[in-house]
Amino acid sequence: QVQLVESGGGLVQAGGSLRLSCAASGRTSDVYKMGWFRQGPGKDREFVASVIWIGESTYYADSVKGRFTISKDNAKNTVYLQMNSLKPEDTAVYSCATGNLRHIWDYWGQGTQVTVSS
């Protein structure tokens, strides 16, 4: 199993920045990719960004392209989400997850709240 712990959420004004971290522990050797998802109030969970764990490929939702950057530190088993030019509609609980070779998101963190005020 893999355990994930997110940190870095908080309250920020529109136009501001936050950096989220997700530390992985446990059986990380089986991880193929890591991703960030979010669920806003009254909304379904949506994909935000992902990165291939052994590699450099990254993927983004259209809504965050050019504003968010996903990165990783394999030595620390940590993935980051740098969020710039934040908008009120970015308000959500952000969760990280690991994905396996079958492209199933199999382990999830507990989430961290991001609130963007207008």
Image (cartoon, rainbow, N blue to C red):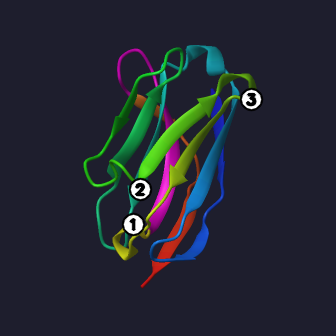
113 sits left or right of 21 in the view: left
Q: Which residue is mark 2?
A: 38
Task: Name the mark nearer the viewer: 2 or 1.
Answer: 1
Q: Which residue is mark 1?
A: 90
Identify the residue shown where x is 40% and y is 41%: 49
Looking at the image, which is closer to me, 41 or 66?
Answer: 66
Q: Magenta residues?
A: 92-104
Residue 99's place in the image compared with 115, above or below, is above
**Mark 3 falls on what kind of element?**
helix
Going by the numbered disc 3, the residue's amino acid type is: Lys
User: In what quadrant of the picture does the C terminus appear?
Assistant: bottom left
Identify the residue shown where x is 40% and y is 54%: 67
Going by the numbered disc 2, the residue's amino acid type is: Arg
- Residue 58's spot in the image, x, y percent? 40, 30
Q: Which residue is mark 3?
A: 76
Sooner in the amino-acid sequence: mark 2 or mark 1: 2
Residue 113's place in the image compared with 54, above or below, is below
- Residue 1's spot in the image, x, y percent? 63, 26
Q: Residue furthest left?
A: 62
**Mark 1 falls on what kind of element?**
helix
Instruction: Tell me if label 1 and label 3 are in contact, CB under 8 Å.
Output: no
Going by the numbered disc 1, the residue's amino acid type is: Asp
Q: CA distance from mark 1 to mark 3?
A: 27 Å
Label 3: few (<14), some or many (≥20) within 10 Å? Answer: few
Identify the residue shown where x is 63% and y is 14%: 29
Instruction: Tell me if label 2 and label 1 are in contact, CB under 8 Å.
Output: yes
